[in-house]
């Protein structure tokens, strides 16, 4: 089976794979009007703590 076509030991049917991959590329006009996550969901961003988010710094000495 192709890599990426299984989930929890249950393979996707071909029609399911076709439905998931049926997403056309964005046009230049759509990209030009795209907004940031923080602009679209400002309340969520305000309530989400910034500390602990993202990749660890790696500066900790053990």
Image (tube, rainbow, N blue to C red):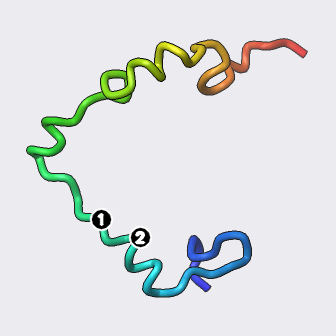
Q: Position of residue 10 (x, y in %)?
A: 68, 79
Q: Quadrant of the C terminus?
A: top right
Of the numbered discs in the image, which one, if any, rests on residue 43?
none
Q: Which residue is mark 1?
A: 23
32 over 28 or under it: above or below: above
Q: Residue furthest front?
A: 43
Q: Which residue is mark 2?
A: 20
Q: Residue furthest left?
A: 29
Q: Residue at x 60, y 14 (%)?
A: 49
Q: Quadrant of the N terminus?
A: bottom right
Viewer-nearest residue: 60 or 50: 50
Element type where label 1 sits in the image: loop
Q: Residue furthest right?
A: 62
Determine the image quadrant of residue 57. Answer: top right
Q: Residue at x 29, y 65 (%)?
A: 23
24 over 42 or under it: above or below: below
Q: Position of residue 22 (x, y in %)?
A: 31, 71
Query: 28 left or right of 50?
Result: left
Q: Position of residue 29 (x, y in %)?
A: 9, 44
Viewer-nearest residue: 22 or 45: 45
59 over 6 or under it: above or below: above
Query: 49 left or right of 42?
Result: right
39 over 13 or under it: above or below: above
Element type where label 2 sits in the image: helix
Q: Residue at x 15, y 45 (%)?
A: 30
Q: Position of residue 40 (x, y in %)?
A: 32, 28
Mark-to-mark CA distance, 2 and 1:
7 Å
Disc 2 and disc 1 in contact, CB within 8 angstroms: yes
Viewer-nearest residue: 3 or 30: 30
Q: Residue at x 23, y 64 (%)?
A: 24
Near mark 1 (Cα within 10 A), the count class, few <14, some 14-19 or many ≥20, is: few
Query: 42 left or right of 55?
Result: left
């Amino acid at each position: 089976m192709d890599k990426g076509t299984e989930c929890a030991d249950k393979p996707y049917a071909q029609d399911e794979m076709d439905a998931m991959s049926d997403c056309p590329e964005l046009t230049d006009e759509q990209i030009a009007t795209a907004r940031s996550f923080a602009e679209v969901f400002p309340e969520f961003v305000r309530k989400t703590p910034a500390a602990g988010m993202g990749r660890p710094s790696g500066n900790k000495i053990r």
